[in-house]
Amino acid sequence: MKRLFVLIFFCCITSLFLLQVSRAHISAPAASVLRVMCLPTRPLALTVALEQGLFAKHGVDVQAQIAANSEELRSALAGGTIDLAHAAVDNAVALAEKAHVDVVVVMGGEGSTNELIAQPLIHSVPDLRGRTMIVDAPTTAYAIQLKKILLLNGLQASRDYQIKAVGSTPLRLSSMRENKEYAASILGPPTSLIAKHEGFVSLGTTQQFLGPYQGIGAFVRRAWAKENRNLLTSYIAASIEAQRWIMDPAHKERVTALLEKEFHLSSDLAREAYDSWIVAPGGLEADSRINLEGFRNVLRLRAEIEHTWSEETPGPEKYYDPSYYDAALSTLSPAK
């Protein structure tokens, strides 16, 4: 009888333990998957959020890939094979206006510290007359920057120079190395820094030529955002936390080491990238905010160069919905 009592007691304890384990699993659901595509590389905040477990903390399982060019990225978002795109926000405007895909920008992250980089024997913008420029895609983002800069110097596309699409920023530098006929391109850091160290020439920064410009941001299909609001705000919250960590001066050495590893830079180049990109005006945006004046400039340039709108140029509010960002920010402690 005593042996039977012990057996019954053991079975009860075991059952209670298994019930608690089961309840624990029920109360901690698996992280929701979010498919992300980036151009030209993964934003540093995405890398930090992955490495430090910030996405996992917010219940998001991020599956990230890098696009070869903006056309691939836009097609993937339009077709629903990805959920969120990280690229120059002008790509979202192009999707909305040219491909009639209802997309919305939900977060910023980076301005534009791009430079017009040319072959070593070219020393001024007028020297580009009669040459071939290379771009990612001919009618979006940094190609529009290029066209405007050349127009400021009296050069018009097709008449005074040719444009060839070759793909993302790293691919453009590789193409300029291999083919000296490719005279110049808009390159951003750290690729622009690598180019200058290899002897290519900077003809000026886009900030000098064009003023503020909203570069990299996150955008999604509007219907998907409405259906996945909690997932999206959790992703944004983790990204903001990562951006805060990157921009905290106390982490300068660790961020420099991360730049060195992530982009295969020398220690000197990594330090230069930190100073001229990460914390420089026009570089990373605090809390991954949208620069609204920079976004207005994106739209003004598109109106002037690509003639996208026959009437008045719309404002950023047509393409940017701050409600997801604001909801994410409200879940975090105030920045230091």
Image (cartoon, rainbow, N blue to C red):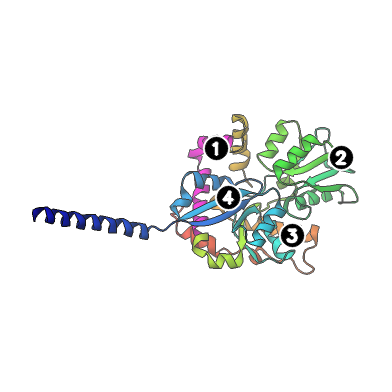
> Which amino acid type is marked by label 3?
Arg
Within 10 Å of the Cα at label 2, are there few (<14), some (14-19), or many (20+) other Cα atoms? few
Task: Kindly report the distance in space between the C-alpha atoms of the residues bearing marks 3 and 1.
Answer: 36 Å
Q: Is residue 2 left or right of residue 283?
A: left
Q: Give the range drawn in magenta.
A: 233-261
N-terminal-most mark, 1 or 2: 2
Secondary structure under tag 2 reads helix
N-terminal-most mark, 4 or 2: 4
Which residue, given by chain and number where applicable, does mark 4 sit on?
64
Image location of residue 265, percent across then percent down = 62, 33
Assess whether residue 234 is covered by the magenta stretch. yes
Residue 335 appears in the picture as rendered: no
Within 10 Å of the Cα at label 4, are there few (<14), some (14-19), or many (20+) other Cα atoms? some
Question: Residue 258, labelled with which disc?
Answer: 1
Within 10 Å of the Cα at label 1, are there few (<14), some (14-19), or many (20+) other Cα atoms? some
Question: Residue 127, labelled with which disc?
Answer: 2
Q: Which of marks 1 and 2 is in front?
A: 1
